[in-house]
Amino acid sequence: MSKQAGIKVFAPATVGNLAVGFDIMGMALEKPGDELIARFSDKPGIQITAITGAKGKLPKDPLKNTASFAALQFLKHLGEDKLGFEFELHKKMPIGSGLGSSAASAVAGVMAVNELLRRPLEKKELLPFAMQGEFLASGGMHADNVAPSLLGGVLLCSGTQHIDIQRVPTPRGLFAAVLYPHVEVLTRAARKMLSDAVPLKKHIRQSANLGGFIIGMYNSDFDLISRSLQDVIIEPQRQSLIPEFTAAKQAALDAGALGCSISGAGPSIFALCQNSLIAENVGTAMQRIYHNAKVESNLYISAINHEGAIKL
């Protein structure tokens, strides 16, 4: 097959867990995200010709990179694994940040191939292949990052053998302030420290918070969202991994955030806010905590991304 001009796709960063939905809820951000340029090649398989923004941390081996691995699983499903492609992966988001970096790459890979092949599958049908790419990085088949990166919005992802994806409405004006402090938290290590046992009282409270959060989102009830956005199970076990987390969370709440918690496995911290002005004030307040602690950080202020991955 002759070469052609490449196409570019964008897959956004995500906030996994959303405090009350461990492994089952996620939210897409408008920024940051990954960009991937793909084109046909005469050489069968997928070659990663360039990776930028990763500081040498990501492999070009197509069987070890989430973007190419997910795309290869997709091609195998289509019976088109003899086709050839070249990928250029441009990481426009930090790696190991708790913002779904590996998921965004996996989504970008399958999205790009689907576009080049003139969309043999609908967008939502790409999810299982993106999840296989994410599994390569995290060791878990969880859709809470992959699904929102692909499809956008706030999603409830339930089930194991068959993943049910439900879109949760978002109130008009809802914004997120997301702070990425430059400290390292390894996802696998953060998962290993979690206890398998949950006290009944905490389970009841967390279940009530999850239900209240979803109902608050449906009804645009900011007070209910605020009362419900409290993680009583995972956050207490993980917060010690993130320096200054307690102070940053309090600063966010004092500045008007509806709620604040850890994004994914961390170290990023997210706060949901009623509008963009509050989000900016909350973000500045959190960033000030880390500035005073002499820890560098990146701040992202974002509305909810309802489109997910797109062709640019």
Image (cartoon, rainbow, N blue to C red):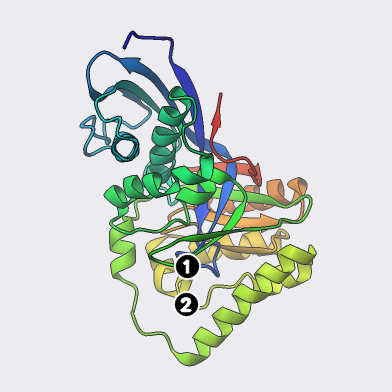
Quarter the N terminus occupies: top left
The residue singled out by tag 1 in the image is: 22
On screen, residue 32 versus residue 161, left or right, reads right
Report x, y in % for residue 203: 50, 84
- Can I make out residue 294 in this image? no
Q: Is residue 235 above or below residue 204?
A: above
- Can I make out residue 286 in this image? yes
Label 2, residues with CA under 10 Å away: few <14, some 14-19, many ≥20 = some
Give the Cα separation between the discs numbered 2 and 1: 9 Å
Residue at image point 31% right, 20% down: 86
SS of the residue under disc 1: loop
Question: Which residue is at the far bottom?
Answer: 200
Q: Identity of the amino acid at label 2?
A: Ile
* Pair 2/1: label in front: 1
Residue at image point 40% right, 49% down: 128
Residue at image point 48% right, 45% down: 125
On screen, residue 164 versus residue 140, left or right, reads right
On screen, residue 181 versus residue 44, left or right, reads right
On screen, residue 108 versus residue 64, left or right, reads right
Report x, y in % for residue 26: 53, 56
| Residue 233: numbered disc | 2
Report x, y in % for residue 296: 46, 43
Location of residue 141 (image quadrant): bottom left
Q: Is residue 274 above or below residue 310?
A: below
Q: Are marks 2 and 1 in contact (CB under 8 Å)?
A: yes
Q: Identity of the amino acid at label 1?
A: Phe
